[in-house]
Image (tube, grey):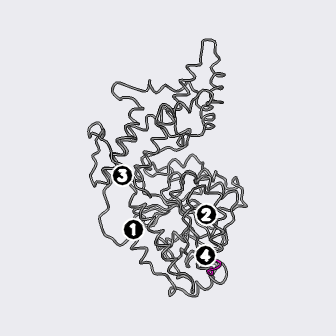
């Protein structure tokens, strides 16, 4: 009977084996934790009208389509970085991604944050590996399950690019709509747990590539561990390599902390730092939140006040991402525009070098092979650094252009100087105006509480010196 109840997802989530699981079941409702700190920190009880960002988002879409996308398509940026921005992604809510080994409490943590435990909406949890799908939990008027193939086919959502990972993956993608106030402002993504003794090809789809797709779009990334699963294997190492450059979005969580005595907790905390140190190459150590994210009360004789403060700190991080969602979206589009501009400048430089080296008797294929094999000999990257305001830290990998030009012949591109028209202007000038004026001006108008118009920048005078209002998250 107990197995049937667990299978039907009708009992509280079981996070630990043995005594703690039995104790939780015996305690029942009387041992449940107070949720007022969640509601107050995330402002779930506030009945204020939703902010109308439609004008700002419309303006952002217009800047992307008129000033960024033409250059992006002309120089096939998507084939270099595999990151195509859709209208659904521009208008989407902030995304919170849950990563980590199997059965560390990722699904239980989502149930706890949303108060879904012991309801028909709760995610299935257990001591064994339970989540085999990428589960997207989003807002909807009623409880509804959406198949991955339907999510990918809906162009109004931000998940249509996932079709490129194949039908096997779409069968492992599921959407759940839940009528919850928090989900009106954020979307959660639960991922399959990392199982180190499983080869990637056994999943039937490119697991690391799919993780990278979600990592690139996540506003906040929770990497969850528990005291029994601190070993770092090949799959976890690969995951942290994929997180490079996203350190500011990462929050590391040591879950189930109240299952340990104080001395044991200190040892586990140190062991986690020791395991992660080689994987996170930053000057400051990562912030590790130590608590127990499930609905039942903390174990007796544990650091209840510490765990509660840690939990509130994490909720404040989540709330800040929600509050700054529009600023983050504009900053994301601007960062994308900078990468597109750098890519266009590099392709232009490769093409110009190729044209300079070609003679009537030259073999074009051999000439360009020499250039792409050793770009430093022709000062490709050094010229970009010398003649533009591009940072050397923003330059892409040289090796990536070998593959890029292997698919896209150099003669299929035009020089930047030829990407101009009398009516439309020059592609390069438009994207530079978006980076230096239009997007910062749009961001500044949010900080000043203005309602930005949806007209073009030429009409609204975006040429004024913008104020830097980017927030540190």
State how far apart marks 4 and 2 are (Cα): 15 Å
**Residue bearing the label numbered 4:** 15
| Badge nearest the viewer, 3 or 1 | 3
Crowding at label 2, few (<14), some or many (≥20) Cα neighbours within 10 Å? many
**Residue bearing the label numbered 2:** 100
Q: Which tag, 2 or 1, sits closer to the chain's start?
A: 2
Q: Which tag, 4 or 1, sits closer to the chain's start?
A: 4
Q: Which tag, 3 or 1, sits closer to the chain's start?
A: 1
Marks 2 & 1, CB-CB < 8 Å contact: no
**Residue bearing the label numbered 3:** 469
Marks 3 & 2, CB-CB < 8 Å contact: no
Q: Relative to residue 228, is residue 460 depicted above or below?
A: above
Picture quadrant of residue 5: bottom right
Q: Which residue is depicted at the point 43% across and 27% down?
A: 419
Q: Relative to residue 91, is residue 390 depicted above or below?
A: above
Q: Position of residue 190 (x, y in %)?
A: 55, 62
State how far apart marks 3 and 1 are (Cα): 29 Å
Crowding at label 3, few (<14), some or many (≥20) Cα neighbours within 10 Å? some
Left or right of residue 63, residue 305 in this image: right
What segment carries the magenta color?
Answer: 260-264
Q: Which tag, 4 or 2, sits closer to the chain's start?
A: 4
Left or right of residue 293, residue 69 in this image: left
State how far apart marks 4 and 1 are (Cα): 26 Å
Marks 4 & 2, CB-CB < 8 Å contact: no
């Amino acid at each position: 009977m107990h197995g049937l109840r667990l299978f039907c997802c009708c009992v509280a989530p079981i996070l630990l084996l043995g005594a703690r699981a039995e104790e939780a079941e015996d305690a029942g409702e009387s041992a449940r934790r107070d949720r007022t700190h969640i509601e107050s920190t995330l402002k779930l009880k506030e009945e204020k009208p939703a902010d109308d960002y439609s004008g700002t988002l419309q303006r952002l879409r217009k800047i992307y389509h008129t000033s960024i996308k033409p250059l992006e398509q002309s120089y096939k940026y998507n084939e270099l970085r595999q990151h195509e921005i859709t209208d659904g992604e521009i208008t989407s809510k902030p995304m919170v991604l849950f990563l980590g080994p199997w059965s560390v409490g990722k699904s239980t943590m989502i149930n706890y944050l949303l108060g879904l435990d012991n309801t028909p909406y709760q995610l299935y949890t257990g001591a064994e590996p339970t989540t085999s799908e990428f589960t997207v939990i989003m807002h909807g008027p009623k409880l509804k399950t959406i198949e991955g193939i339907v999510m990918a086919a809906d162009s109004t959502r931000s998940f249509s690019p996932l079709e490129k990972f194949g039908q096997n993956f779409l069968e492992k993608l599921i959407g759940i709509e839940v009528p919850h106030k928090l989900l009106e402002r954020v979307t959660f993504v639960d991922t399959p747990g990392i199982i180190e003794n499983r080869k990637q090809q056994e999943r039937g789809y490119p697991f690391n590539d799919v993780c990278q797709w979600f990592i690139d779009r996540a506003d906040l990334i929770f990497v969850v561990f528990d005291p029994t699963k601190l070993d770092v294997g090949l799959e976890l190492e690969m995951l942290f390599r994929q997180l490079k450059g996203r350190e500011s979005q990462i929050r590391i969580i040591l879950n189930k902390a109240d299952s340990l005595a104080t001395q044991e907790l200190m040892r586990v905390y140190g062991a986690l730092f020791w395991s992660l140190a080689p994987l996170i190459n930053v000057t400051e150590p990562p912030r590790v939140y130590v608590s127990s994210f499930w609905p039942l009360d903390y174990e007796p004789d544990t650091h209840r006040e510490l765990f509660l403060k840690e939990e509130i700190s994490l909720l404040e991080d989540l709330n800040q991402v929600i509050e700054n969602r529009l600023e983050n979206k504009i900053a994301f589009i601007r960062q994308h525009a900078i990468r597109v501009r750098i890519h266009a400048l590099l392709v232009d430089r490769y093409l110009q070098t190729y044209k300079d080296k070609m003679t009537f008797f030259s073999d074009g294929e051999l000439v360009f092979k020499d250039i792409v094999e050793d770009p430093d000999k022709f000062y490709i990257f050094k010229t970009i650094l010398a003649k533009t305001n591009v940072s050397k830290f923003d330059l892409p990998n040289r090796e990536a252009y070998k593959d890029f030009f292997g698919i896209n012949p150099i003669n299929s591109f035009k020089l930047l100087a030829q990407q101009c028209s009398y009516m439309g202007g020059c592609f390069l000038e438009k994207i530079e105006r978006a980076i230096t004026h239009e997007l910062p001006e749009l961001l500044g108008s949010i900080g000043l509480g203005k309602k930005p118009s949806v007209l073009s920048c030429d009409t609204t005078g975006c040429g004024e010196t913008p104020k830097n209002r980017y927030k540190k998250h």
